[in-house]
Image (cartoon, rainbow, N blue to C red):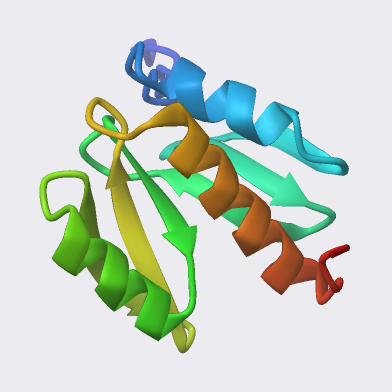
Amino acid sequence: MRRRPRREIAPRKPSVWFEVARRAAGALPGVTEHASATGPVFRIGRRRLAWLAEDGVSLVVPIEEDERDMLVAAEPRTFAAARAEGGRPLVRVHLAYADPGTLARLLAQAALTLTGANPIP
């Protein structure tokens, strides 16, 4: 009896709103995009900068806890607190409602925090 070959599971495709995040992350130095089984991931070196959430329309970004709380309180439709991973507080950004400039600043701040670089005044 012949066995059928195993079918590979294709990675989940991002929504059209993911292009906004792709443009914002692509403008940052050292950021690369990688495919994973759960969706696209932006990395700086081996560390994850941001990744597509399970819903396919949100981006998960590590951020300081006080800044996350401020964003969630100011724009609850756009930002939501995500479950902390490895002790890092995370924010979920709904890409359909996110302002491209705000998303770019958020990713830039996350990149600075991730690399430990000091912002130039």
* Quarter of image, res 91: bottom left
- The x, y position of residue 100, in whole percent, is 46, 29
* Quarter of image, res 22: top right
Give whichever of 25, 73 is nearer the camera. Answer: 73
Q: Residue at coordinates 28% horizontally, 72% vertically from top-left?
A: 70
- The x, y position of residue 18, in whole percent, is 42, 23
Is the C terminus in the top left, top right, bottom left or bottom right quadrant?
A: bottom right
Quick check: 120 above or below 117? above
Quick check: 75 above or below 87? above
Along the horizontal axis of the image, is 76 left or right of 45? Answer: left
Q: Residue at coordinates 48% horizontally, 84% vertically from top-left?
A: 86
Q: How many marks?
A: 0
Q: Residue at coordinates 50% horizontally, 34% vertically from top-left?
A: 101
Is the N terminus in the top left, top right, bottom left or bottom right quadrant?
A: top left
Give whichever of 38, 53 is nearer the camera. Answer: 53
- The x, y position of residue 37, in whole percent, is 47, 37
Asked if one can make out residue 7 in the rendered structure from this viewpoint, the answer is yes
In the rendered image, the residue lying farthest to the bottom is 87
Q: Residue at coordinates 66% horizontally, 51% vertically from top-left?
A: 108
Quick check: 105 above or below 94? below
Asked if one can make out residue 37 in the rendered structure from this viewpoint, the answer is no
- The x, y position of residue 103, in whole percent, is 47, 41
